[in-house]
Each structure stands twice: as structure tokens, then as C-alpha cells.
Image: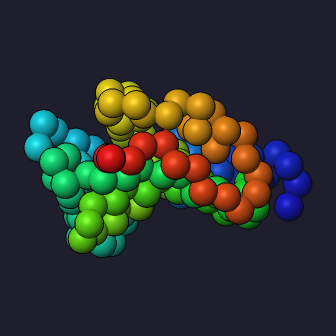
Amino acid sequence: MGLFSFLKRIFKSDGKLYPESLSQVGFDSDRIWVQHPNQDEKSILWDDLIGVEIRTTDEGPYNPDVFWILRTKEKTLIYTGGATGESEMIEQLQKLPNFDNEAVILAMGSTFNNTFICWENK
């Protein structure tokens, strides 16, 4: 597959990344939810959030290689970088006290298997 064919496959005319944008992440004042194609919606409460991290892999650009992980004591929400609603979610997460924007920057530049801690409720 040539580069142009590859890029045409992962970027549609609307500029969204596929298949990553098929997943959706959203929030309101009480909860955060993730909806993956053909799966039930999963959600957590903001009040229960204890950690935010980004995991990166060495599998890009042919496979999703950035994963947001939002943890509570009992649940974990995971969605890919490029999910619909990701930008709005990042803006909301940045409002958490002591959110580590540098960790986000480092994660977005990573091409290795790694975990970047962006926020922990201490």
C-alpha cells in the first residue's frame, strides 16, 4: 500500500482519524462517558476519578497508538487518541488541579510503549 493510499484510508474527507473517531468520549458536570462502536456506553463519576494517564505504543501509524485511561478505584475508561470529543475532554481534564500538560505533550510525541501520568488525586 502506498503512502497516499494509506493516508486516504486513515483520514476521511472530514479530517477525522479512522477508526479512532468512531469512538466517542463526552462529559457533563457529573460524569464522563465513552461509547465504542457496537458496545454499551461506559461511564464514571467525576467525583470518583483518581487518575488520568496516557499509554502509547510503537504500533502507529498503522494502528491506534495513543490511549487515554481514566481510572476510579473500581472502573477504568479507555479511549483512543482521535476519538470524537477528545479535544473537549482534554480541555476539561486540564481543569483538574495540578494536571500535567507536559506529560500530555511528551505522550503525543512518543513512538514507544510508555505510560504518562497526567493527573492523580492525592
Residue name at image x 19 percent, y 54 percent: 48
Image coords of residue 14 (percent x, y): 52, 35
Left or right, 117 with reference to 90: right
Disc tally is 0
Task: Choose between 86 and 100: the one closer to the eye.
Answer: 100
Query: Residue 44, located in which quarter of the rendered image?
Result: bottom left
Residue pictured at 41% horizontal, 61% vertical: 78
In the rendered image, which quarter contains the N terminus?
A: bottom right
Q: Quick check: 113 above or below 39?
A: above
The spot of residue 42 in percent (x, y) is: 24, 64
Tell me the residue at 50%/34% (across/down): 100
- On screen, residue 60 versus residue 92, left or right, reads right
Please give the name of the residue rendered at 58% of the width and 50% of the height, measured from the top-left corner: 116
Left or right: 50 in relation to 18? left
Q: Is residue 105 left or right of residue 88?
A: right
Q: Does residue 122 lie above or below 78 as drawn? A: above
Task: Mark yes or no: residue 34 visible.
Answer: no
Up-down relation of residue 82 to residue 88 (above or below): below
Quadrant location of residue 73? bottom left
Q: Which colouring convention does the figure follow?
A: rainbow
Residue sticking out furthest to the front: 122
Residue 49 in view: yes
Q: Nearer the viewer, residue 8 or 117?
A: 117
Query: Looking at the picture, how far across and down is residue 109, in whole percent?
Result: 72, 40
